[in-house]
Amino acid sequence: MQAIGIIVVVIVAAVAVGYYYTTIPTGPTLPQVIKLGAVMPLSPPGAYASGQEMKMATELAVNEINTAGGVLGKQIEVIYEDTAGTPEKGKAAFEKLITQDKVVAIVGEFHSSVTLAEIEVTNANKIPFIVVAAWSDKITAKGYKYVFRDGFTNSLLYRSYADFIKDAGFKNIAVIGEDTDFGIGAADVLKTRLTELGLTATSTVLPMTTKDFVPMLTRLKESSPRPDLIVEVFTGAGNYILIRQAYEIGLAPTKETMFADPNDEYLSKEFWETIGPGGQYVIGYNVFSPKAKLSDVGKKFMDNFAKTYNRAATSVTFGQYDAVYIMVDAIKRAGSLDGDKIAEALESAKWDGASGTITFSKGAQEGLPDYLFHQWAGVPLFVLQYTQVNQSPDDAEIIWPSNLATAQIAYPP
Amino acid sequence: MLPLDPTFFFTQLANALIIGVIYALMALGLTLIFGIMKIVNFAHGEVYMVGGYAYYVAASLAGIDVYVSLVLAIGTAALVGLAIERFLISPSYTGKVEKKDEYTILVTFGLSIFMLNSVLVVFGPWPRRPPSYAPGLFTMGTITVSLDRLVVTFIGIGLLAATLLLLYRTSIGKALRAVSQDREAALVVGINANRMNALTFTLGCALGGAAGALTSPIFLAYPDMGTFPGIKGFVIIVLGGMGSVPGSIIGSILLGLVEVFTSAYIPDPRRAFAYRDIYGLIILVLVLLLRPSGLLGEKGRKA
């Protein structure tokens, strides 16, 4: 009886394998499906929550594109790779995607340290890569032909953020960053720019694993003069814990010291779940706001995302969604799967995406700073403030830039 | 600027003791398992995580009273510990595997990866915050600490005291210590060493789970919440003296004091905060230089 069972299993398996191999494409110029790689952190020590959101946005975009007929008459297949936030895993993932899966292009990434390792692989193999949410200036400043970015760079975001801080009238700012390529770079840009603007700024870099910020926050509270604004550049669970602890010890947000969280965590629903009433009056940012004019594509994406995944779209999801579309559009205009042709098509891209009309600037060739090479220089920035507990990012007030502002900055009583 | 202000000093002292007690809870379970069974449990951080998530499920999802939830969470961690011991650890001393030490290292290491990723799949990557044990602030004179931390510290001290009583004032404790000191002699006088192993592992995991459940309202519950405390636990074990229970408690408090007071008083604030973990390790190196077997360690590794 058992022998018969085993024989049946073997036969079924053999037939299945045979069927699989006979359906594999043999030789035409275009394969059956066009393979794209999507990379993001999906397990620790990476920022796996943001990575999961990026994966969701990829699925949404690819489903839409495939339903509408795919590209060059083919369906798109996405191969997801988890980098776990570590450069060596990211590098291995890229090598696998390129040599084994034979993807034609790659989109995604969240951690700068990982991206810096990956762009070496993608550039050497001539595979176009749109970086979405890794912000280190160095990524685009290297001037690599196959590397593009449709999200912020540290300088692009935090120089503007420093302008907001000055306009809002803060004088003495404490910057707290995590010890990663992103955090160190961001804290540096903020401190430098704030000092240039004539304000007093200190910056402190802490290990990314820090869970107890109380000793340091107590010290800030007792220091004189006490800072009138704390700006944190921290990702993952540490982001929420820092705000919560600042609130619990009565440091910020208060009349004397306000709190700014210009990070993606500000927009996720865990912000309120984990911080509670301490989140009221916290200042953040977003790349879109329904209170300002949102493009039709952006509105449709926001609604679809909320409907499909039961959570609000965040800035990384906008970036990832657009990156998939821009890459597919470039493949279409190139009419080929050749890396050089796709990269050239990306250089002339002009895509009406969810976050705006996306083009890539050429850095020094156009007299711009080197981090603006193959970079979308027009990523929108809205400085937001939660004025109520449990407020959704869509209802948060826009407090900067002033021409789009819906309210003045609000202080706790 | 700061320095000799008494409010600042006492606030930081309170912080240091609170952190020290939390460290002690994490380290004690690990110490018991190491001291009595001579096993390094690499999955201890994940047991801590199980405690945190069990508390979250009971208190947030099922809406059970926070203190009942705490007991349930400790019970869950204990059951998980018992299961791990029965199914995965016991082969190492019942003669089913040849290389005992390598086996336990590999099996607990693999288990740690398995547990972490299982939680990632089941609960998703988003951090969770279970309800506080006692919301609000506690103010005494000019010192203010969050009530949550204070309550957690007192419960933690209670659990530590109960464990010490069990070890030093009961016959079970005597048997456990006997196994730790000389396994074969303990067998000769009629102690069932296998049962003591199961008890040790269960107790150790219950303590780890308690630490996770107690700290999850403060430091949140998320899949890799146990990774870093796990590493701290190993540092404390070495600091305290490889399996010495009082040593691990003293080591924990010492580590809490060093980490908090360096953060508070080193003049350059950037160095003070950024190198916090390094100051703890400097103490470890110093202790090992002066007392190579740790603070209270002895050659015989007594529990």
Image: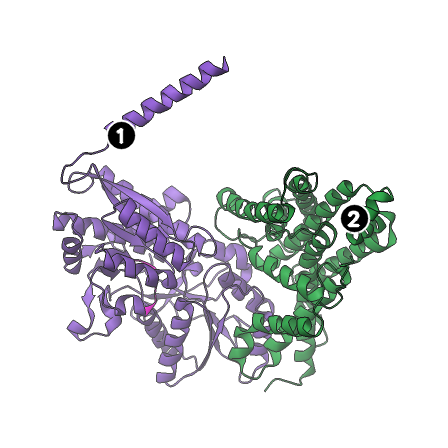
Chain colours: A purple, B green
Q: Does the magenta-highlighted stretch encompass residue A116?
A: no
**Could you tell me which quadrant the C terminus of chain B lies in?**
bottom right
| Among the 4 quarters of the image, the one containing residue A17 | top left
Find residue A328 and report its horizontal and vertical position in percent.
21, 48
Residue visible at 63% across and 60% down in the picture: B234
Give a yes or no on whether discs 2 and 1 share a subunit.
Answer: no
Magenta span covers which residues? A131-137
Q: Secondary structure at mark 1?
A: helix
Query: Of the residues shown, which amino acid type is indicated by label 2?
Result: Arg
A327 relative position to B23: left or right: left
Q: Residue furthest top?
A: A1
Q: Is residue A202 visible?
A: yes
Tell me the chain of label 2.
B
Q: Dot 1, how many residues are within 10 Å of its Cα: few (below 14), some (14-19), or many (20+)?
A: few
Count of labels in the image:
2
What secondary structure characterizes most of the magenta part? loop
Query: Of the residues shown, which amino acid type is indicated by label 1?
Result: Tyr
Cβ atoms at labels 2 and 1 below 8 Å apart:
no
Residue visible at 34% across and 69% down in the picture: A154
Residue visible at 31% across and 64% down in the picture: A152
B241 relative position to B260: left or right: right
Q: Is residue A390 visible?
A: no
Q: Which residue is mark 2?
A: B183
Tell me the chain of label 1.
A
Question: What number is the disc on residue A6?
Answer: none
B21 relative position to A340: left or right: right
Q: Dot 2, how many residues are within 10 Å of its Cα: few (below 14), some (14-19), or many (20+)?
A: some
Q: Which residue is mark 1?
A: A21
Find residue A187 and report its horizontal and vertical position in percent.
41, 74
Q: Does the magenta-highlighted stretch encompass residue A133?
A: yes
